[in-house]
Amino acid sequence: MNRDTRLSDVLHVLLHLDQASDPVTSQVLSQSMGTNPAVFRRTMAGLREAGYVTSGKGPGGGWTLAVPLDQISLLDVYTALGCPNLFAIGSRSDNPDCLIERNVNEALAETMRQAESLFTERFGAVTLDTLVPDRPLPN
Amino acid sequence: MNRDTRLSDVLHVLLHLDQASDPVTSQVLSQSMGTNPAVFRRTMAGLREAGYVTSGKGPGGGWTLAVPLDQISLLDVYTALGCPNLFAIGSRSDNPDCLIERNVNEALAETMRQAESLFTERFGAVTLDTLVPDRPLPN
DNA sequence: TATATCGTATCTTTTGATGATACATATAGG
DNA sequence: CCTATATGTATCATCAAAAGATACGATATA
C-alpha cells in the first residue's frame, strides 16, 4: 500500500507559502505538490479551518500563511490534517472470546501506543521555522 | 488504507500451534485466521523458511511448531515475515534539488527511524511464551 | 458584467493487497 | 502402485481506499 504523503506535502507547501508575499493560487501550489487544484484544496481544508492559512476567492485570490512558522508545530499540522493513521500494521479483529488473540492484540497495541507517543512528542517539539533552509536554529 | 494484519495473524497461529500435539492443516489454520488455505500458506512461507515451523505434505501432514515459544521473539516473527512496512505515512518523493523538501523529509524520516527502533527493541524483548494465556510470566 | 478563484460534490481511475482457483508435487497407507 | 490428502505456488479475479479528474456553484475583483 502506498504511503500517505499529505503531511509531508502540506509542510512543503507551508514553507513555500512563508516565502511568498502575495497569495498563491491552488493551481500553482498543486503543481509543486504534484497533483491538481481540487486535490490540493481538499488536502488543505483542515489547515484553513484550523486557521494556519487563509484562502481568498476571485482575482488576486489564493493561499496565504496566517500564522508565523515558529508558532506552528509539526503536531499542529498533523492534527489539522485530522490525525491520519500513522501505522501500516494492526490486528484483524477483536475477538474477545479468544484469550490468545487478546494477548497478541494487546502486545501490539501497547507498542503502537508508545510509538504514537513518540510521534506526538517529537512532532510537538518541532516548529516549522526550524525546517527552513539556511535559517539558523533559534538558541 | 487497510492495515496489514499478518503479524497479528501469524502470532495467533503460532500460539495455537503450540497447543497442538499433531500437525494442523492449512485448511483448519486458515479458518482460524479468517482466510483461505492458499493465503495462509503464502503468509506462513517466511516462517517455514526461517525454521520456526515445519510443514508436511500428504495425509497426516500440516503445520508444526519447530521451536519452543520462549525461543521466538516478536521481532523474529516480524523479520520472518520480511519486515513489513510499519508506517502509513511517508514522503512523496525525494527531490534533492529542493532544500525545503529535504528538510521536511529528514524531519519525518528521523522520527520514523526512532519509532522503528522502538518497535524493534520492544519486539525483540517479547518472547511468544509470554503471550500464552494463564501461563505465569517467567521471573 | 466578465473573469478569476475557491469549495466541494461526484465520478473515474489506480493500485496494492487479498482472495480464489488450479495444478504440480509429495507423502502416507493399504 | 494407486489413491487420497496435503502442501507449494503461479496466476487470475476481486476489492477497497486513496487519489485524480471533472463539473459547477459561489464569491470576489475590477
Image: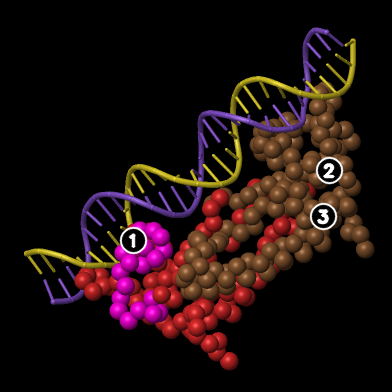
Chain colours: A red, B brown, C yellow, D purple
Badge 3 element: loop
Q: Position of residue A71 (x, y in %)?
A: 48, 83
- Circle 3: is it few (<14), some (14-19), or many (20+) Cα within 10 Å? some
Q: Is residue A84 visible?
A: no
Is A32 inside the magenta-drawn segment? Answer: yes
Nearer to us: label 2 or label 3: 2
Q: Amino acid at mark 2?
A: Gly
The residue beneath circle 3 is B73
Give the residue drawn at x 73%, y 30%: B27
Against C5, residue B61 (above or below) is: above
User: Which of the numbered marks, if any, corresponds to residue B99?
Assistant: none
Tell us which disc is closer to us: 3 or 1: 1
Whichever of callouts 2 and 3 sits on the residue coming sooner in the sequence is 2
Q: Residue C27: x and y, percent? A: 86, 24
Position above or below: B49 against B115: above
Which amino acid type corresponds to the residue marked 3 in the rendered image? Ser
Distance between mark 2 and mark 1 Cα atoms = 52 Å
For marks 2 and 3, give the CA distance: 13 Å
Count residues near mark 2 (Cα–Cα under 10 Å), then give few for <14, some for 14-19, many for 20+. Answer: few
**Residue B126 drawn above or below residue D30:** above
Q: CA distance from mark 3 to mark 1?
A: 48 Å
Magenta extent:
A17-37
User: Quadrant of residue B54 in the image?
Assistant: top right
Q: Residue at x 50, y 83 (%)?
A: A134
Q: Is residue D3 above or below residue A108?
A: above
Whether residue A120 appears in magenta in the rendering, the answer is no
Residue in front for this viewpoint, B47 or A113: B47
User: Does residue B75 appear anywhere in the picture?
Assistant: yes
Number of the label disc, if any, that sits on residue A37 = 1
Q: In front: B121, or A99? A: B121
Residue type (three-letter) at the residue carrying disc 1: Pro
Residue, disc 2: B51
